[in-house]
Amino acid sequence: MRDTFLSPPADQGFGSYLLHAEPDRTLAIFVVSWLPRRGAPPHDHGTWGVVCGVKGVETNINWLRTDDQSKPGQAELREDGRVSLGRGDIITVTPKDIHSVINETDEVTLSFHIYGRHLNETGRNRFDVEQKRVEPFIISVR
């Protein structure tokens, strides 16, 4: 395990480290580290994915979109369950699934991610539940 994986950037709250991407970008593999008490807002992926816990426990919160999607830039979500992902646990995501992630522990956690496309090339979105907004979700990748 690289020491850099355990020092994710504080401004983002998590680190996404690209291990491999196919030249045509049809497959991308990442290690993601989550700072204590931090995470990612509700978001979709725009591609299929498989996530496996490596170190610690992260909480994945599933969301359902409840609006009719007729208003650009607006979205309404409601929570639809939680899953704890520990070492060796696996979850899958479809292109339309919406989830958020939180590291509720006091230590950096790690997970291994495989996606059908590089995440910054899928047109994925992040959602603000309080403001009922949706916007593109581009992350810093190391």
Image (tube, rainbow, N blue to C red):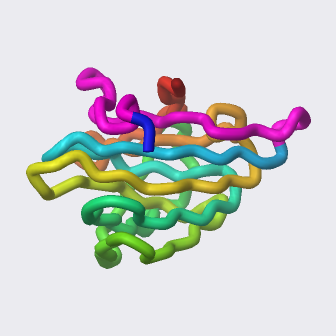
> Residue 97 magenta-drawn?
no
Q: Is residue 2 left or right of residue 30?
A: left
Q: Is residue 74 something one can see in this rendering?
A: no
114 up-or-down from 26: above or below: below
Find the residue positioned furthest to the right: 24
31 up-or-down from 23: above or below: below
Residue at 31% of width from left, 37% of height from top? Answer: 6
> Residue 13 magenta-drawn?
yes
Which x, y percent locates residue 99?
A: 42, 60
* Figure quadrant of the N terminus: top left
User: As rendered, which of 68 and 129 lies closer to the eye?
Assistant: 129
- The residue segment tinted magenta is 3-25
Which x, y percent locates residue 101?
A: 33, 55
Which x, y percent locates residue 106?
A: 9, 50
User: As rendered, which of 95 and 88 lies closer to the eye?
Assistant: 88
Q: Quadrant of residue 15?
A: top left
Q: In this view, does 73 lie to the left or right of 5?
A: right
Which x, y percent locates residue 104?
A: 15, 57
Residue at 13% of width from left, 56% of height from top? Answer: 105
Residue at 53% of width from left, 41% of height from top? Answer: 125
54 up-or-down from 115: above or below: below
Q: In which quarter of the image is residue 60?
A: bottom left
Q: Is residue 80 something one can see in this rendering?
A: yes
